[in-house]
């Protein structure tokens, strides 16, 4: 289920971790800085196209952005084959964002 609150928190955290301004992110998405602020404050949501752009920019999964998983890393096929399900669970737990604990 989509959570505007989780999306807002994660967007803001990711943006700040990249030392990216709201204006820079707005320019990337073709929207205004005010719209970025509204996204980060949970006042609005965004299109699937922009969601994909954000996931690509921050190198995280869409599921992570919208709160469907706490595992931010996009797993490539060759990565999945290297680890057992138990190891993947350990990696997921290790990489869980601090705000989610």
Image (cartoon, helix red, strand yellow):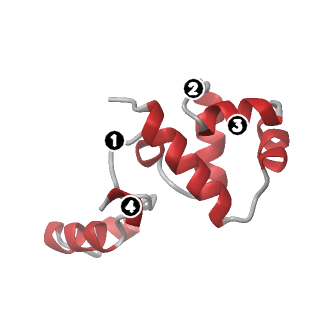
Q: Nearer the viewer, mark 1 or mark 3?
A: 3
Q: Which residue is mark 4?
A: 77
Residue lying at 16% horizontally and 66% vertically, measured from the top left? 85
Residue lying at 49% horizontally and 40% vertically, measured from the top left? 7
**Horizontal and vertical percent for residue 92?**
29, 66
Q: CA distance from mark 1 to mark 2?
A: 15 Å
Quadrant assignment, res 36: top right
Q: CA distance from mark 1 to mark 3?
A: 22 Å
Q: Which residue is mark 2?
A: 45
Q: Nearer the viewer, mark 1 or mark 2?
A: 2
Q: Which residue is mark 1?
A: 68
As drawn, which residue projects farthest toward the left?
86
Which of the marked residues, 1 or 2, is nearer the chain's N terminus? Answer: 2
Whether pointer 3 and pointer 2 mark residues with C-beta atoms closer than 8 Å, the reply is no
Query: In what quadrant of the picture does the N terminus appear?
Result: top left
Query: In what quadrant of the picture does the C terminus appear?
Result: bottom left
Which of the marked residues, 1 or 3, is nearer the chain's N terminus? Answer: 3
Which of the marked residues, 4 or 2, is nearer the chain's N terminus? Answer: 2
**Horizontal and vertical percent for residue 3?**
40, 32
Q: Nearer the viewer, mark 4 or mark 2?
A: 2
Q: Nearer the viewer, mark 3 or mark 2?
A: 3
Name the secondary structure under disc 3. helix
Q: Residues within 10 Å of mark 4 (few under 14, many from 20)?
A: few
Which of the marked residues, 4 or 1, is nearer the chain's N terminus? Answer: 1
Q: Which residue is mark 3?
A: 37
């Amino acid at each position: 289920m989509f959570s505007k609150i989780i999306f807002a928190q994660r967007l803001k955290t990711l943006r700040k971790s990249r030392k990216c301004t709201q204006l820079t992110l707005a320019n990337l998405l073709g929207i205004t800085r005010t719209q970025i602020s509204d996204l980060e404050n949970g006042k609005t949501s965004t299109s699937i196209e922009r969601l994909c752009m954000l996931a690509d920019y921050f190198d995280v999964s869409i599921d992570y952005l919208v709160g469907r998983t706490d595992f931010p890393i996009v797993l490539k096929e060759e990565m999945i084959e290297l680890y057992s399900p138990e190891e993947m669970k350990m990696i997921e737990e290790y990489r869980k964002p601090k705000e989610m604990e």
